């Protein structure tokens, strides 16, 4: 059945986006294609009644997702409630979240997105843009590097809401073009350049490019298939945000040498043991401390944002292990940040619906501010927001 979803969604979304069919007949077209595919795949192995049942089920699943991609209205949100109050040892200044996965601007059935292994929130269905901005306001987050997934079949539709957010909440979300992490949906370099030329100056970065995902299996950071994106980043002065996989240090260093004016923003526990050496050797290398402030060292353990599936589980585990997480983060990163204060940034790695919940957001804000408060005062603002402003500020990095 997953195969049916892949085939039909691709056909129907293409027809919708290119204007060959209207919403009024999406369901009929989808049902006809679905029934043909069901019959082709199952043959005579099931009854006519079962074929009709499967057809109806898949038709509803697919059309509901496709139709939701056409919703361009941002919900009006009244931002109520006070900002949190913290003790004297907490950092109390501004922040910029350098790692925020924006809710999807489309709602395609999960089967289509299975390769990405990523159950992100959907904008205005799971998370209203206004609610996200309200949470940033309450926690004194000036802005965020917002990673927008833009599938090749939905470039036009995705851009409608991305631009709308930019116009409604100017300078709050710094937009990055993020690959879909699904092989058949990933943008090509030519697609990215088309977006950049049609919206000059709007996008500030590419990524996150998560090389541990199945869509990039066997691909190293210096692979020829990725160099086209780095060339574009160099041409248009974009930040490249990347999560390397294990065993990729040499390739990471290769791209840093080959593209000395491109600002590479890395993250991930895979780099934990060597990133402090990388930032010393390469002034165009930057690193976000994000999951390290919600997880016991070693990714995907009890506190990790992506390990717990419910808000209640995350909050319980976070409160249980908070002191351990904070002590580990201070022990691992305090000295490194203070030695190279211009190349580390703060972030959250939010993506799932629960990550945008206010209670969860206040926990992430609180531990970040306590961690920053332990840094030397001379570097606190750099880590909290000034380094993020610098690398997204429109000037190429000079050696």
Image (cartoon, rainbow, N blue to C red):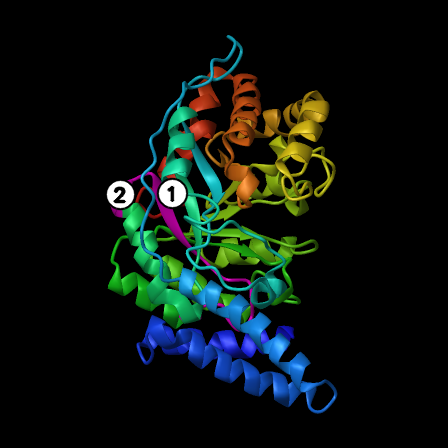
Across and down, in percent, residue 271 comes to 64, 45
Residue sitting at x 34%, y 48%: 396
Magenta stretch contains residue 182: yes
Q: Residues within 10 Å of mark 2 (few under 14, many from 20)?
A: few
* Viewer-side residue, 165 vs 94: 165
Whether pointer 1 and pointer 2 mark residues with C-beta atoms closer than 8 Å, the reply is: yes
Residue sitting at x 41%, y 18%: 82
Magenta range is 167-189
Kindly identify which residue carries mark 1: 129
Across and down, in percent, residue 11 comes to 46, 79
Query: On the rendered structure, is 242 left or right of 138?
Result: right
Element at badge 1? helix
Residue 303 shows in the view: yes
Residue sitting at x 32%, y 41%: 393
Q: What is the CA distance from the residue labelled 1 to the residue labelled 2?
A: 10 Å
Across and down, in percent, residue 68 comes to 42, 60
Quadrant of the rendered image containing residue 386: top left
Kindly identify which residue carries mark 2: 168
Across and down, in percent, residue 270 comes to 67, 47
Residue sitting at x 47%, y 54%: 207
């Amino acid at each position: 059945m997953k195969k049916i979803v892949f085939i039909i969604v691709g056909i129907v979304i293409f027809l919708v986006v290119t204007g060959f069919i209207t919403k009024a007949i999406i369901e009929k077209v989808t049902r006809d294609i679905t029934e043909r595919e069901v019959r082709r795949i199952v043959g005579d192995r099931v009854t006519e009644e079962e074929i009709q049942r499967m057809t109806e089920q898949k038709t509803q699943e697919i059309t509901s997702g496709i139709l939701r991609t056409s919703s361009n209205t941002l919900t009006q949100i009244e931002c109520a409630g006070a900002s949190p109050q913290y003790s004297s040892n907490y950092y109390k200044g501004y922040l910029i979240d350098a790692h925020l996965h924006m809710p999807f601007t489309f709602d395609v059935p999960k089967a289509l997105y299975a390769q990405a292994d990523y159950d992100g929130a959907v904008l205005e269905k799971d998370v209203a843009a206004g609610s996200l901005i309200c949470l940033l306001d309450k926690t004194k987050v000036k802005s965020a590097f917002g990673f927008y997934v833009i599938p090749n079949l939905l470039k036009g539709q995705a851009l409608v809401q991305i631009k709308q957010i930019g116009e409604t909440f100017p300078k709050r979300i710094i937009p990055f073009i993020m690959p879909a992490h699904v092989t058949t949906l990933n943008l090509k370099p030519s697609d990215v350049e088309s977006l950049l030329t049609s919206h000059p100056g709007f996008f500030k970065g590419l990524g996150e490019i998560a090389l541990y995902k199945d869509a990039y299996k066997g691909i190293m950071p210096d692979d020829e298939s990725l160099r086209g994106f780095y060339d574009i980043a160099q041409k248009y002065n974009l930040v490249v945000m990347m999560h390397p996989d294990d065993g990729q240090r040499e390739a990471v260093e290769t791209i840093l040498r080959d593209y000395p004016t491109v600002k590479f923003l890395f993250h991930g526990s895979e780099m934990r043991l060597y990133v402090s050496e990388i930032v010393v050797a390469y002034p165009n290398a930057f690193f976000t401390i994000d999951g390290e402030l919600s997880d016991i060292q070693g990714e995907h353990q009890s506190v990790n944002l992506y390990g717990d599936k419910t808000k209640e589980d995350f909050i319980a585990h976070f409160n249980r292990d908070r002191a351990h997480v904070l002590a580990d983060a201070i022990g691992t990163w305090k000295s490194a940040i203070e030695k190279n204060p211009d190349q580390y940034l703060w972030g959250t790695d939010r993506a799932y619906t629960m990550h945008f919940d206010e209670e969860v957001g206040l926990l992430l804000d609180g531990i970040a501010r306590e961690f920053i408060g332990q840094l030397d005062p001379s570097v606190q603002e750099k880590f909290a927001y000034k380094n993020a402003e610098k690398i997204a500020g429109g000037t190429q990095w000079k050696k």
